[in-house]
Amino acid sequence: MAVTINASTTTGLVQSADLSGSLNIQSNGTTVLGVTSTGTSVTGTQSVSGNLSFNSGYGSSAVAYGCRAWVNFNGTGTPAIRASGNVTSITDNGTGDYTVNFPAMPDVNYCVASVCTLSDAVVAGNTERGFSPRSYTTTTVRLLVTDGASGVDPLLCNVAIFR
């Protein structure tokens, strides 16, 4: 038997049931949480306060730390974002020197993971370089990529910010 609980702005809290064997939580007639014998589905953007924990088959639940912002951009010429999530823009500060701009973090104690590719050619051990973070603020991280001696504009840049 399915149970549907709907919080409506016109009729208040309404409960109904059928024989499908599921549980549905609704807001104004739209299901936001569904539970069936095969799994759980969440629809739309939902907020969760506290820590998100899950067990992915490793034997115990642990807190999940999500990627808060990421970007894939072209570092040659005028930097162009190819794809991103929660990154508002890239600033070109000079050769190999970039600022990644994003919505405010709670503080500057986040982790930046990055890698860039200098060329299309495969040159043994010399085509990928990591960025060196230069400065952190709650809304930006400034990064420098070098060829070992001086700043270079890489062909492909990937940056992920975790908090």
Image (tube, rainbow, N blue to C red):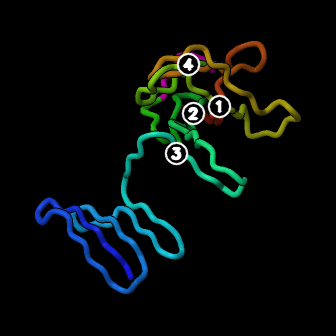
Separation (CA) of disc 2 from disc 4: 15 Å
Q: Nearer the viewer, residue 113 or 6?
A: 6
Q: Name the residue under label 1.
A: 113
Residue 54 screen position, x and y as percent:
59, 51
- Please say if the residues under marks 2 and 4 sit with CB atoms less than 8 Å apart: no
- Please say if the residues under marks 1 and 2 sit with CB atoms less than 8 Å apart: yes
**Which quadrant is home to the N terminus?**
bottom left
Given the image, on which type of amino acid does mark 2 rest? Phe
Q: Which of marks 4 and 3 is in front?
A: 3
Instruction: Name the residue rendered at 52%, 69% in the picture.
Output: 39
Residue 111 screen position, x and y as percent:
61, 27
Given the image, on which type of amino acid does mark 1 rest? Ala
Magenta segment's dominant SS is strand
- Region in magenta: 90-96
SS of the residue at dot 3? Answer: loop
Tally of marks: 4
SS of the residue at dot 4? Answer: strand
Numbered circle sitting on residue 162: 2
Mark with earlier residue (1, 3): 3
Q: Nearer the viewer, residue 160 or 125?
A: 160
- Left or right relative to 102: residue 58: right
Q: Mark 3 points at which residue?
A: 52
- Please say if the residues under marks 1 and 4 sit with CB atoms less than 8 Å apart: no
Q: Mark 4 points at which residue?
A: 142
Q: Is residue 25 covered in magenta?
A: no
Separation (CA) of disc 1 from disc 3: 22 Å
SS of the residue at dot 2? Answer: strand
Separation (CA) of disc 1 from disc 2: 8 Å
Residue 8, image quadrant: bottom left
Instruction: Name the residue rendered at 56%, 47% in the picture.
Output: 53
